[in-house]
Amino acid sequence: MRFGDWDVRTCIAGRFGLDGGAMFGVVPKTMWERLITPDAFNRVPMVMRILLVRGHGKPIVVDVGAGAGHTEKNKQIYAFEDTDHLADTVRANGVEPSSVTDVLLTHLHFDHGAGIVEPQGNDWRLVFPGAAHHVQRSQWTHAFAPTPRDKASYYEERLRVMERGGVLRLHDGPWSLAPGFDLLVFDGHTPGQQLPVIGGGDGALFFCGDLLPTHHHIPTPYVMSYDLYPVTVMNEKAALLERAEAGKWLLCFEHDAHMEACHIQKDGKRFGAGDPISI
């Protein structure tokens, strides 16, 4: 789908499951299970949807999923599926991994950033070795000094490969990669989550990351227990939805297993999801 000067495709970098209670925070199970049916372990199905964007001479990847090489313990906890084919997935969409110029990481939690590398013997190698890997400085700093609450979300050994490989680019606040490709910063889920608005002007695409992991998280109180600062998330989400509705933005959901994208509908003061759209 075209957004301004940019061609955008979505790819699935894998599937996994997360605890339904954690995904919906204070919302009771009697309410959220009407939206997503959990499995026998109370996990709800999730995808790791990434963006492959081309324009201005740049093949760009936004987020990389969890990658391969997981411990048996994490495989049992998260029920990972098909997480070891990122390079092949990108190649199947017409882009050689070696030609990718930029990798934009919304943040560094394992389901967004661990796939920057793939196993190479007893070590790791970059999937996109020629690309600049863009991260907010506040997120990079937090990843190596996390709270006990989110420490398990960061795979530090993998993240250090960006530094060793000389591909890491740190940013301080909102910035633009190129005309019509802007990064907004949100701090409620984790410090320095950067989310792209692609296309510029009305009708742009907004990649929701973990601000709105699924379309079920559009209502203000529906925030995750994974969010470090839930009230901040609610405020950030409310402001974003107003902006998205006014600009007719298309919202693309990174983790939604059932809806790829939609426009926002407003009924009085309440926002809701419009009809499903495939990008």
Image (cartoon, rainbow, N blue to C red):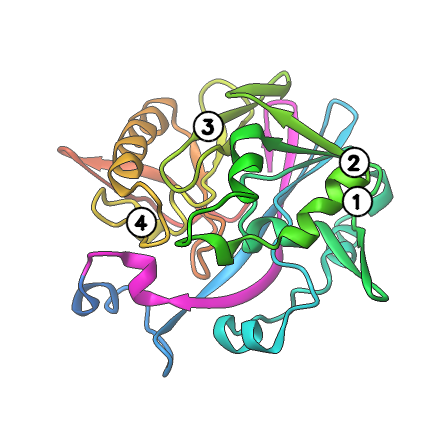
> What kind of element bears circle 2?
loop
Instruction: For the C terminus, give its image quadrant.
Output: top right
Mark identifier at residue 266: none
Disc 1 or disc 4, which is closer to the eye?
1
Residue labelled with disc 1:
128
Q: CA distance from mark 3 to mark 1?
A: 24 Å
Mark 4 Cα-neighbour bin, 10 Å: few <14, some 14–19, many ≥20: many
Residue closest to the far left = 268
* 18 lies above or below 162: below
Label 3 and label 2: CA atoms lie apart by 22 Å
Residue designated by label 2: 131
**Crowding near the residue tagged with mark 1, few <14, some 14–19, many ≥20 C-alpha atoms within 10 Å:** many
Q: Earlier in the sequence, mark 3 or mark 2?
A: 2
Which stretch appears magenta?
1-27
Mark earlier in primary sequence (1, 4): 1
Q: Nearer the viewer, residue 84 or 114?
A: 114
Within 10 angstroms of label 2, few (less than 14), some, or many (20 or more) residues?
many
Across and down, in percent, residue 128 comes to 79, 44
Q: Does dot 3 land on a helix, a strand or a loop?
A: strand
Q: Which residue is mark 4?
A: 217
Q: Earlier in the sequence, mark 3 or mark 1?
A: 1
Q: Amino acid at mark 2?
A: Ala
Q: In terms of depth relative to the viewer, which is nearer, 134 or 16? A: 134
Residue type at numbered disc 1: Phe
The location of residue 68, given as percent across then percent down, is: 69, 65
Q: Do callouts 3 and 4 mark residues in contact (Cβ within 8 Å)?
A: no
Residue 185's label in the rendered image is: 3
Q: Earlier in the sequence, mark 3 or mark 4?
A: 3
The percent coordinates of residue 258 (x first, y second) are 43, 60
Q: CA distance from mark 4 to mark 2?
A: 32 Å
